[in-house]
Amino acid sequence: MSDDELIDVPIESLPLDGWHRARGARMVEFAGYYMPIQYEGIMAEHLWTRESAGLFDVSHMGQLLFSSDSVDVAAALESVLPGDVRGLAPGRMRYSLLLNGEGGILDDLMVTRLPEGSAFDAAFYMVVNGATKWDDIAHILETLPEEVTINHLGEQALLALQGPKAVDALDRLVPGVSALRFMQAAGFERDGVPLWISRSGYTGEDGFEISLPAEDAEGFATALLDQGEVKPIGLGARDSLRLEAGLPLYGHDLDEATTPVMADLGFAIAKRRREAGDFPGAERIAIERAHGAARQRVGLVIEGRQPVREGAAVLDTGAGEVGRVTSGGFAPSVGAPIAMAYVPLALAAPGTRIQLAQRGKVHWGTVTPMPFVPHRYVR
């Protein structure tokens, strides 16, 4: 295709676009959408979320429903996911991975078995990353039996309320959500608006994700901000919070060339599935589990005050490049720069001191277990 044949794809707006702008958000392009990167500042928003409750708009994510009148949907999903989907109880959710035939990660996601009588009227609900959702849908459609129906919930917004006081604020508006535990979800209603709420999130803090009709998102978000514990939080703090929590970001820390073993996400492959070897890339993943992968995702605490950023080189003793930093920045809760990187297995042990190169300057980091900040999930 020539340059003059390229299609100019417009950037989309979130249902809450005007709501964000009215509250002083600085908007940037992300995953094909205009999204708020910050309001009052990344540092302040980060610390507020760790201490109180932050409201994130994640409506760019893909929300999918799976149903069928004739085939077992759980068994069908296990043809593309390595987790124990069949073993999920109603109202329970699980982190999983969409894998290609070589065991490379096409996306990471959350899948939930819906209880009977759910307002969604389907067997399973899945949330995938916004930047990959259309590719995910195409891949799943190619793989699953044609008897499985996939419904993309394009008219649903998705909000995330995160932080130690999130439960107090949300339970005031939606009584009963405090009974949920980590990775559990249920249907609720407020003023006639159906809400699908899970106790989950992407910050390492306790919190909730709320799916609701896009037309009702502004009223609900405003009601949340009326609670004294809650402030709006942008993508900048979302990134620093998830980095401190040791959570990878697809397209940066995960990609098609990365396997679950490399990414230290082996927990997402259920024991039953490992033993059966009945998922995409099972043979390669079994070899890596037995003998180790060529490279491993690790956490680094960086010496000094200057952060190293994505793309910085990991060097061996001869100053040759042997790995790459995939995420990095200053960690407000740690008070120091931190990073994630892929390094050779010989350099992956905690306590190993590693040399890094960025823009002609040399930095040093020490391999440290993740998360950098303890998770505070309510189990």
Image (cartoon, rainbow, N blue to C red):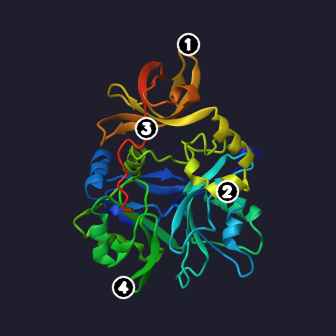
Of labels 3 and 1, earlier in sequence is 1
Give the foreground label among 2 and 1.
2
Q: Which mark is residue 190?
A: none
Of labels 3 and 4, earlier in sequence is 4
Task: Name the amino acid, label 2.
Answer: Arg
Q: Secondary structure at mark 4?
A: loop
The answer to whether residue 240 shows anywhere in this view is yes
Give the foreground label among 3 and 4.
3
Q: What's the distance in space between the residues labelled 4 and 2, CA to CA?
A: 43 Å
Task: Name the amino acid, label 1.
Answer: Gly
Task: Name the amino acid, label 3.
Answer: Pro
Residue indicated by mark 1: 318
Q: Secondary structure at mark 2?
A: helix
Can you give x and y, in whole percent of width and height, for residue 209 in the image?
Answer: 43, 66
Can you give x and y, in whole percent of width and height, for residue 148 in the image?
Answer: 72, 73
Residue shown at 36%/25% (left/top)?
303
Residue indicated by mark 3: 369
Task: Name the amino acid, label 4.
Answer: Asp
Q: Label 4: few (<14), some or many (≥20) within 10 Å?
A: few
Please say if the residues under marks 1 and 4 sit with CB atoms less than 8 Å apart: no
Residue shown at 35%/60% (left/top)?
206
